[in-house]
Image (tube, rainbow, N blue to C red):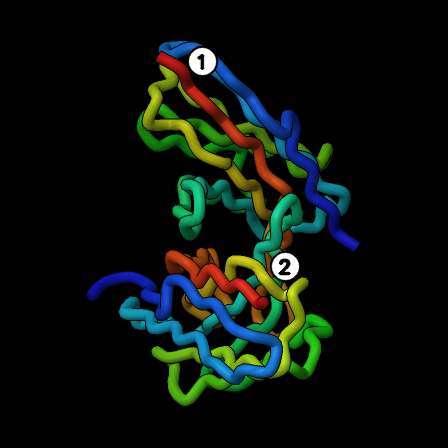
Amino acid sequence: ETGVTQTPRHLVMGMTNKKSLKCEQHLGHNAMYWYKQSAKKPLELMFVYNFKEQTENNSVPSRFSPECPNSSHLFLHLHTLQPEDSALYLCASSQAGTSGTYEQFFGPGTRLTVL
Amino acid sequence: KQEVTQIPAALSVPEGENLVLNCSFTDSAIYNLQWFRQDPGKGLTSLLLIQSSQREQTSGRLNASLDKSSGRSTLYIAASQPGDSATYLCAVRILTGGGNKLTFGTGTQLKVEL
């Protein structure tokens, strides 16, 4: 596999379910990101991890819980979601550091529907 | 707070036409700017990245320009093809204490017709 992969690609869950989204990058990067893309709205940054440490939480509700066990894997644990959380969730990775472009490479996304 | 605006929101052109997509941002203190393409229900594909010290970047039929002082960027697509139909997103990057942050526009939805 190459690039950034995300599983599952589609997920339907009830408001009381617990599920997890998975992201894996095969680019040797050390920064990973979660974004939310809702209809008619710009992509919203949710979380940033640099060298496995969370460096940004963009005021995301606690029903979204990220986990970054190593530089290649990123999870988003979901529990007690609301219908308005239905969206496309995108993962990205980049090279962290003090120089360079920080160009981010995106996965295909997980289309989440909360019933 | 950085805001990114893209005009037009949607555009339909006949095949072969040259076209320009516009992006403006409110805070000129950016590190770089990135143009992406997104196909329906898919992830983002990076097209071009322009550093703040650069004026333009080219890749094939695509040319992106940056006027940082006026807060504007344009994406020029030459000889458009039906395969260019997609949503084009502009994003500006700033550096933060923890790394970097991208702020996205809402995109321009392009349709190239036969």
Residue at the spot of label 1: B18
Q: Which residue is drawn at 65% across and 28% down?
A: B7
- Nearest-to-viewer mark from 1 and 2: 2
Q: A30 or B16: which is nearer to us?
A: B16
Q: Which residue is drawn at 27% across and 69% down?
A: A26
Horizontal placement of A81 versus B109: left or right? right
Cα–Cα gap, marks 1 and 2: 31 Å
Residue type marked 1 = Asn
Q: Position of residue B54 (x, y in %)?
A: 52, 39
Question: Disc 1 sits on a residue from what chain?
Answer: B
Residue type marked 2 = Glu
Check disc 1: other Cα within 10 Å, few if <14, some if 14-19, many if 20+.
some
Residue at the spot of label 2: A44
Q: Which residue is drawn at 20% across and 66% down?
A: A1
Quarter of the image for residue A45 reads: bottom right
The N terminus of chain B, quarter of image = bottom right
Quarter of the image for residue B81 reads: top left
